[in-house]
Amino acid sequence: MEEVEVAPPRRLEVRVKLLFTSICHTDLSFLKGENELQRKFPRILGHEAAGVVESVGEGVVDLAPGDHVVPIFNGECGACAYCQSGKTNLCGTYRVNPFKSTMASDDGTRFSVVDGSGVRRPVYHFLNTSTFAEYTVLDAACAVKIHPEAPLDKMCLISCGISTGVGAAWNTANISKGSTVAIFGLGAVGLAVAEGARLRGAARIIGVDINPEKITKGERFHHGGSFQSQ
């Protein structure tokens, strides 16, 4: 653990007190630095979280201190051609770049530390979120307001794993009522696919995994049979 200074939010940014965060395999990949582009350190990882807005920068109108929010790594400006055509995941301003390590507004950082010689050094951002900290600064477009009574310890999973799986079922596969669905891999994303398929009315949901523990856990989320592949 290390103490890091978190600057106040600038225009169209919010500073969030993070209360819950979870870990994703993507965090581990960047921590290991599996390729040269990932080795941008020092850096605050983490991208699945939930918290409360602590302060807002100039121009922020949809969020206020005290709002409960979930950070997201794919924001939307609402004004570019992609956003106007409904393809908000391709937003020209806030579309996630896994290798970008600075804020969208000015290519700067809001994190810093003072080294042993008294020099202030930047600490870089991750996936527009950086949630492995007590506080983070987000573009307001990357913070989604949620109901104040929603359980934050569960809502943190919405940031990535759950939305990835449900989105695959609803948007990519566009599962229809009565479908038969096979899911290969019953980790968090796979289980979210199963739940998305169930909500869409799939008649049979089949889970496949090489891990017997995941097979057992997956049986609580789908019906229609489970298979352990080798």
Image: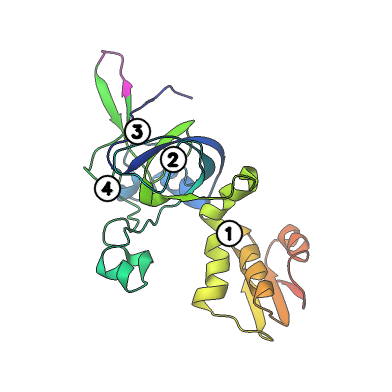
Per the model, the C-alpha gap separating discs 4 and 2 is 21 Å
Q: Are marks 2 and 3 in contact (CB under 8 Å)?
A: no
In this view, which residue lies farthest toward the front? 61
Residue receiving disc 2: 64
Residue segment shown in magenta? 113-118
What amino acid does circle 1 point to? Ile
Per the model, the C-alpha gap separating discs 2 and 3 is 30 Å
Q: Is residue 217 above or below residue 155?
A: below
Residue 62 position in % (x across, y down): 41, 49
Residue at 42% x, 36% y: name it. 136
Residue receiving disc 3: 42
What amino acid does circle 3 point to? Pro
Residue 206 position in % (x across, y down): 71, 76
Q: Is residue 230 visible?
A: no
Q: Are marks 4 and 2 in contact (CB under 8 Å)?
A: no
Residue receiving disc 1: 162
Q: Secondary structure at mark 2?
A: loop
Chief secondary structure of the magenta span? loop
What amino acid does circle 4 point to? Ala
